[in-house]
Image: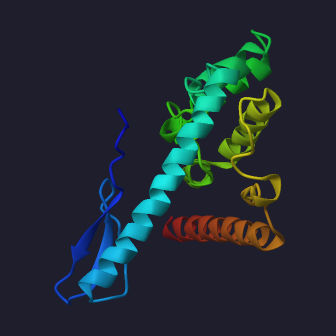
Amino acid sequence: MQKVMNVTYRLYRRKNGKYYAQHNETGRQISLRTSDENTAKLLLQGHNEGSRDAQVSREVGLAYLSCTDPEAKKRTWAWVFAEVLKTKSKDTDNYRRWSVAIRDKAFNSIRTMPLIDTRSDHFLKVLHEGSVSTNVFLRRIHNFAIDMAWLARPVIVKRQWPKVKHRKKRAVTCGLASKKRTVKSSHLVNCFWLRSQLGTGN
């Protein structure tokens, strides 16, 4: 029996008479730029066929992948984190750094995500929510997965990785030092004035 795949988009007509293709899962709408129902149905069919072709291609790819690598569908980023940690010597600073790094909350959105389902926008979300450390360790984890052939291609190619931006450290400038000296001098003047007043009172 042939499997029937559900359509991705349905037709939606707004109050202004314009038709949209609405995604059945996310609710996101794409303007079909027409008020004619027949034209809108043809355009909707094009969106659904394009989406169906992509789904079919993915299923075929996964079928081939399952034959060559049966564990591919099961590998999540949490599993990769654990495998990376196994390569580090326990009771060392490096092991402790990695132990802390993989508990970063920024990784929560991809922790249970299969590697084969990971897109660049998933990584960008992690990088946006994380810190400099997140960027550094995600790169290393990503490269580890590629080197182990668990990723068929990079999630983000090297030249597109956001640059690591370290926060500027605040240095003591001459102006700040001068200001501190001025405040200190002012305190001394107040002390001398107070002593002179006390002396006058006696």
Left or right: 108 as drawn, with respect to 44: right
Q: Is residue 131 visible?
A: yes
Tell me if I can see residue 99 in this picture.
Answer: no
Left or right? Give the position of 63 relative to 41.
Answer: right
**Most foreground residue, 117 or 8:** 8
Establish if 121 lies above or below 195. above
Q: In this orientation, which residue lies closer to the viewer: 166 or 105?
A: 105
The residue at 58%/30% (across/down) is 63
- Image coords of residue 142 (percent x, y): 73, 38
Question: Where is residue 34 drawn, in percent x and y?
Answer: 33, 88
202 vs 17: above or below:
above
Name the image colouring: rainbow
- Quarter holding the N terminus is top left
Residue in the picture at 53% in, 53% down: 54
The percent coordinates of residue 27 (x first, y second) are 30, 62
Residue 160 appears at what percent x and percent y? 76, 59
Residue sitting at 71 percent across and 35 percent down? 151
Q: Of all residues shown, which one is farthest toward the left?
A: 15
Q: Nearer the viewer, residue 62 or 93?
A: 62
Q: Is residue 16 left or right of residue 164?
A: left
Q: Quadrant of residue 64?
A: top right
Of 197 and 58, which appears nearest the observer?
58
Q: How many marks?
A: 0
